[in-house]
Image (cartoon, grey):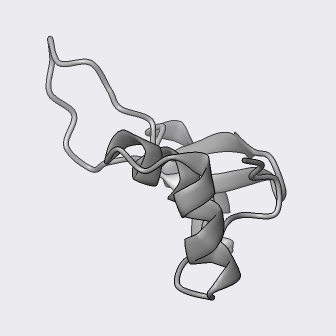
Amino acid sequence: MEAYSQPQAVHNGSVVEVDTEYLGKLRLARPAPIMHGTPLHIPSAAPLYGQHTIAVLRELGWDDAAIGSLHNAGIVRMGQQSKL
């Protein structure tokens, strides 16, 4: 995107690169405010559809058999790399 290569944006550090598992490196805008003494949170790419389904359901107390049943019934979707 043209805005990410503007000299002022690059000079101000307004553009950061993040590595993603499936898309490689992405250039993203960092949060606009810069506050001294506050750590900068570098954004990450949005998760893929279903990427965290298993982890969230396990955190809620669901076991693998129940999660598998939900998936087989088409109620939830799991990411391509997700394994029970």
Residue 62: image location, x then y, percent: 42, 50
User: Furthest-top residue in view?
Assistant: 37
Q: Quadrant of residue 36?
A: top left
Q: In the rendered image, which quarter contains the N terminus? A: bottom right
In the depicted view, which residue is nearer to us: 26 or 33?
26
Picture layout, residue 84 above or below residue 12: below
Q: Position of residue 31 (x, y in %)?
A: 31, 48
Position of residue 15 measured from the top left corner of the image (x, y, whole percent): 54, 48
Viewer-closest of 78 and 47: 78
Q: Residue at x 82, y 53 (%)?
A: 81
Residue ID at (71%, 54%): 26
Against 22, is 76 above or below?
below
* Residue 45 appearing in the image: no
**Residue 14 visible (yes or no):** yes
What residue do we see at 66% from left, 41% from top? 18
Residue in view at x 43 percent, y 53 percent: 57
Total labels: the figure holds 0
Compared across the picture, whether 36 is left or right of 68 comes to left
Indicate the quadrant where residue 77 lies: bottom right
Closer to us: 5 or 82: 82
Q: Is residue 38 above or below residue 71?
A: above
- When the figure is inspected, residue 81 is found, relative to residue 2, above or below; the finding is above
Left or right, 25 with respect to 5, comes to right
Seen from this angle, which residue lies furthest bottom?
Answer: 74
